[in-house]
Image: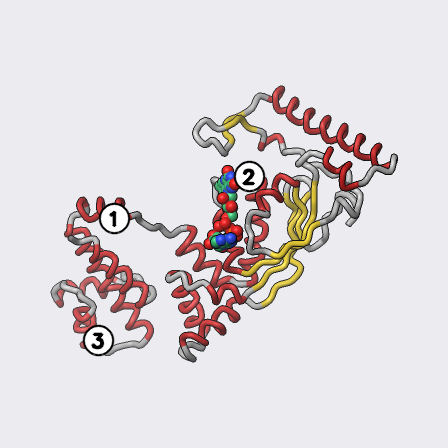
Amino acid sequence: MTKNQIPKDAIKCLDKGFVRLVDSMGGDDAIVQSARVSYGQGTSKVSQDRGLIRYLMRHRHTTPFEMVEFKFHCKMPIFVARQWVRHRTANINEYSLRYSEARDEFYFPDPAHIQFQSTLNKQGRMGDVPAELKQKVLDYFKEISDRSFAMYSDLNEAGVARELARSLLPVNLYTEWYWKNDLHNLLHFIGLRSDSHAQYEIRVYSDAMAESVKKVAPFAWEAFQDYVVKGMRFSRIEQSLLEKQLPPRVVDDISEDIAYQITATMHKNKPRDEPDLYPLYQKQGGSDSEEDFKFKWDSGEIETGNVRELREFKEKLQKLKK
Ligand SMILES: Cc1cc2nc3c(=O)[nH]c(=O)nc-3n(C[C@H](O)[C@H](O)[C@H](O)COP(=O)(O)OP(=O)(O)OC[C@H]3O[C@@H](n4cnc5c(N)ncnc54)[C@H](O)[C@@H]3O)c2cc1C
């Protein structure tokens, strides 16, 4: 790749970097296919495939997600690569500065991302930096990049080994690599590196790779959002607080809603005759009178979901009722 060139099919990242999906193997279908080995031939419809993927994600049955592979070509500053490389499950092949000459490509931050050291988070930035100080930051970035590259080029021309001369170059120099990983570990990466606690510069790359996941495995991406990114887990201490403080009435009200939702979902999946609906609702633990049931049922406001998931939720709720 020649200097500052971004491949046509790549997502531009930072000022000179990019992420490009080179290849992928499998998608949602590969997850379902491998899961069926353990669960039998139970599912075949698209809706059932989605349900199975969501079940796997919810229960952290992770290996089927490892059946999907992604290979990316990425170009990033070395300080971003240092964070990235901590994710040990990937296969990497990087541009060699022993073999090839470094290119004069350095990261210069966008002024909008030049901020003060955060006082709340030791690993973050916050607040607006005055224009004068921003300019100073940019001038320093430029000065160190130009000066180090001039010294590096000088040593190169004098025939000094590239593997030694490169150590003069700062970590805002761009590097490139091929990075291959499976979906399970890629989602783990995205969970950590697209999070607001991650450094902005790596977040940009993580978000770019996420775009490929959305396209290649949309059900897995949706489940990842629902159960991992936007899901919540409680510690033992938090749970015991909830057990103590949550009025049983609240748990009962939610359980009642769930009974309605399970009934409506079962009816949607396999329509029942009207007289069978109230007994079905009672079987799901519903305790409203038949009159109240009919009133609510006719309102058409009952949401549907996934029966298994709703039952799991009900079980969790009951555990909070001491
Ligand atoms: C916001 C943030 C701040 C960070 N700050 C620092 C810091 O200050 N200093 C620092 O050094 N690092 C820091 N890190 C890096 C962090 O500690 C992890 O090294 C990095 O996020 C990779 O995570 P991982 O090990 O789970 O991922 P991966 O290496 O991708 O591994 C994925 C999973 O595979 C398993 N695994 C992989 N290899 C092994 C192994 N050898 N043994 C056992 N299990 C394994 C683990 O379950 C692991 O979770 C930070 C990361 C983040 C996101």
How far, Cα to Cα, is label 2 from label 3?
Answer: 56 Å
Number of numbered discs: 3
Circle 1 or circle 3, nearest the eye: 1
Residue 158 lies left or right of residue 252; in this view the side is right
Q: Tell me the tag on residue 239.
A: 1
Q: Residues within 10 Å of mark 1 (few under 14, many from 20)?
A: some
Badge 1 or badge 3: first in the primary sequence: 1
Amino acid beneath label 1: Gln
Amino acid beneath label 2: Tyr
Residue 173 lies left or right of residue 217; in this view the side is right
Q: Which residue is more in the foreground, 83 or 2?
A: 83
Q: Ligand 1 closer than 8 Å to the CB at disc 3?
A: no
Q: Which residue is more in the foreground, 207 or 85?
A: 85
Q: Which residue was labeled with disc 2?
A: 200
Residue 8 in sight from this viewpoint: yes
Circle 2 or circle 3, nearest the eye: 2
